[in-house]
Amino acid sequence: MKTITLSVRGMTCNNCVKHVGEALRGVAGVSRAEVELAAGRATVDAADEVTVDSLLAALREDGYEASAA
């Protein structure tokens, strides 16, 4: 198990927080995703095989840009 922190751009409201969390939790191996609107950050607990690229791809599909923090 590992924790990955992402900087997420494009979140403007609580609905965005909901969508980002759902997108991250939809990645196989993710057990928890906590999203902070004010900080523009998402913290993910995931299995060791989950890659940052897979998380970033899931966010891009939902229209959000992100990078490893």
Image: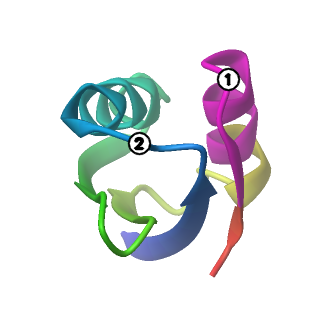
How busy is the neighbourhood of tag 1: few (under 14 within 10 Å), some, or many (20 plus)?
A: some
Tell me which residue sits at (29%, 39%) in the image.
17
Q: Is 58 contained in the magenta span?
A: yes
* Cα–Cα gap, marks 2 and 1: 12 Å
Which residue lies most toward the front here? 12
Tell me which residue sits at (49%, 29%) in the image.
27
User: Residue 30 location in percent, x, y?
Assistant: 37, 43
- List the residue tagged with mark 2: 12
User: Residue 26 location in percent, x, y?
Assistant: 41, 22
Q: Nearer the viewer, residue 16 or 27?
A: 16
Which residue lies most toward the bottom here? 69
Q: Quadrant of the C terminus?
A: bottom right
In this rendering, the answer to whether 10 lies above or below 4 is above
Q: Quadrant of the N terminus?
A: bottom left
Q: On the picture, is 16 further left or further right than 15?
A: right
Element carrying mark 2 = loop
Tell me which segment is drawn in magenta: 55-66
Q: Is 36 contained in the magenta span?
A: no
- List the residue tagged with mark 1: 63
How busy is the neighbourhood of tag 2: few (under 14 within 10 Å), some, or many (20 plus)?
A: few
**Does label 2 or label 1 sit earlier along the sequence?**
2
Quadrant hosting residue 10: top right
Tell me which residue sits at (49%, 72%) in the image.
4
Q: Nearer the viewer, residue 65 or 33?
A: 65
